[in-house]
Amino acid sequence: MNAAKIRRMAGLLQARLPELRLDLVLDPRKSRGKRWELSSVLRAVLVGIMAGQKSLREIEQLTDELSLTARRKLGIKRRLPDTSIRETLIRLEQQELRGCLHRVVQAANR
């Protein structure tokens, strides 16, 4: 994906991320050894999906290739390992994520 597309996508997400209310998703992980904020992991996955990434490994590569500006806009500090993404996602309650997506769809309809 070229840099211009990533910048546009980051701008769109930055504008819409507050509507998602990712902070409402409960983090089921133990606080000990937690290296990534849940919201950062969820933002990385969302960016990866929007960018057409087909695996967690591709999402990891995308987070490695993001420019400093895009990282700041999205709140992703550095490359996010695919194993960290996986371990986080398998612990989440799907219903909570579904609620986030419903909120953003409702906001877009308004």
Image (cartoon, helix red, strand yellow):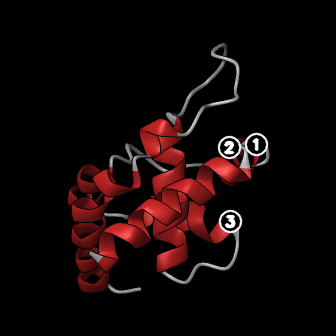
* Residue at the disc numbered 1: 87
Q: Residues within 10 Å of mark 3 (few under 14, many from 20)?
A: some
Amino acid type of disc 3?
Answer: Arg
The quadrant in which the C terminus is found is bottom left
Mark 2 vs 3, N-terminal side: 3
Residue 8 in percent (x, y) is at: 23, 79
Q: Which mark is residue 48?
A: none
Query: How far apart are labels 3 and 1 at the CA level?
Result: 13 Å
Instruction: Identify the image quadrant of the N terminus.
Output: bottom left
In the structure shown, which secondary structural element does the residue marked by tag 2 occupy?
helix
Residue 84, disc: 2
Name which quarter of the figure residue 91 lies in. top right
Residue to which mark 3 is pinned = 57
Comparing 82 with 11, the one in front is 11
Judged from the image, the secondary structure of the residue bearing numbered disc 3 is: helix
Relative to 79, residue 16 above or below: below
From this viewpoint, which residue is outermost toward the top?
A: 32
